[in-house]
């Protein structure tokens, strides 16, 4: 398995922060949601929890707060935290990423993995997925997750590139409902906690 030595931010990487969603970002979250709905993407709402089904941002935030609490998380789900990726210079959301605390679940251990993510279509090809993933691996480290499973569709070259750039080592391909999914593992070697 690949070993990721988490280190100081690369100067060439975009300047973003991962934060838990708040109502301060309500309008931008709702615009983000509509952009996903209007997109032609096949993997819509990856890492966004139940954002698609919610009738308001408040409902979404309330739901994901429950699911991030190990004691309150519904038994059919895995505790997780969802983060919005906010660009520092203009405070705009560029993506959403989640972190599942474990993958002791039939879907997650097979093809879901420890995290999913979605970058706004107008913000792609700027390195945001790579940096979101790097920052979320720091969150994995804080939770004591040393081996991280991340998957992507076989034709999702941008996602694969972000995974490999963060130390992802290809394990194998599997077929899920007629789609080929690639499985990658990242082993985290703690170096520092700079985000």
Image (cartoon, rainbow, N blue to C red):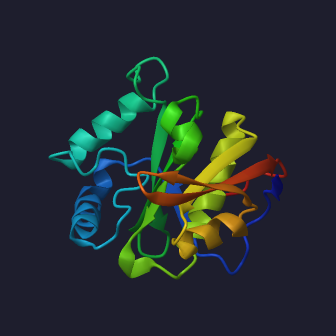
Q: Residue most toward the left?
A: 55
* Observer able to see residue 193: no
Residue drawn at 58 percent across, 76 percent down = 127
Residue 23, percent from left and from top: 28, 49
Residue 75, percent from left and from top: 41, 19
Residue 83, percent from left and from top: 46, 51
Residue 77, percent from left and from top: 42, 29
Q: Is residue 18 above or below residue 160?
A: above
Q: Is residue 82 above or below residue 125?
A: above
Q: Quadrant of residue 123?
A: bottom left
* Observer able to see residue 162: yes
Judging depth in this view, the residue of 54 and 110 nearest the camera is 110
Residue drawn at 58 percent across, 55 percent down = 151
Judging depth in this view, the residue of 22 and 115 nearest the camera is 115
Q: If the image is split into quadrants, where does the C terminus sit? A: bottom right
Judging depth in this view, the residue of 111 and 117 nearest the camera is 111
Q: Quadrant of residue 32?
A: bottom left
Judging depth in this view, the residue of 164 and 54 nearest the camera is 164
What is the total number of numbered labels drawn onto the structure image? 0
Asked if residue 93 lies left or right of residue 54, the reply is right
Asked if residue 180 lies left or right of residue 51, the reply is right
Q: Is residue 51 above or below residue 159?
A: above
Residue drawn at 51 percent across, 46 percent down = 112
Residue drawn at 67 percent across, 51 percent down = 137
């Amino acid at each position: 398995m690949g070993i990721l030595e988490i280190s100081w931010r690369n100067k060439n990487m975009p300047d973003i922060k991962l934060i838990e969603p708040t109502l301060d970002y309500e309008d931008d979250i709702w615009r983000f949601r509509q952009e996903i709905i209007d997109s032609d993407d096949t993997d819509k709402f990856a890492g966004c929890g139940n954002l698609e089904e919610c009738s308001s941002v408040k409902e979404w935030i309330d739901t994901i707060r429950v699911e991030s609490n190990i004691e309150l998380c519904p038994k059919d789900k895995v505790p997780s935290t969802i983060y919005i990726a906010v660009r520092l210079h203009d405070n705009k959301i560029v993506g959403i990423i989640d972190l599942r605390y474990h993958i002791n679940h039939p879907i997650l251990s097979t093809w879901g993995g420890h995290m999913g993510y979605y970058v706004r279509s107008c913000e792609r090809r700027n390195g945001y997925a790579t940096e979101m993933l790097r920052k979320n691996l720091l969150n994995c480290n804080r939770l004591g997750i040393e081996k991280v499973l991340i998957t992507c569709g076989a034709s999702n070259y941008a996602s694969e590139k972000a995974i490999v750039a963060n130390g992802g080592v290809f394990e194998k391909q599997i077929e899920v409902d007629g789609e080929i999914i690639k499985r990658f593992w990242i082993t985290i070697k703690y170096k520092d906690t700079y985000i």
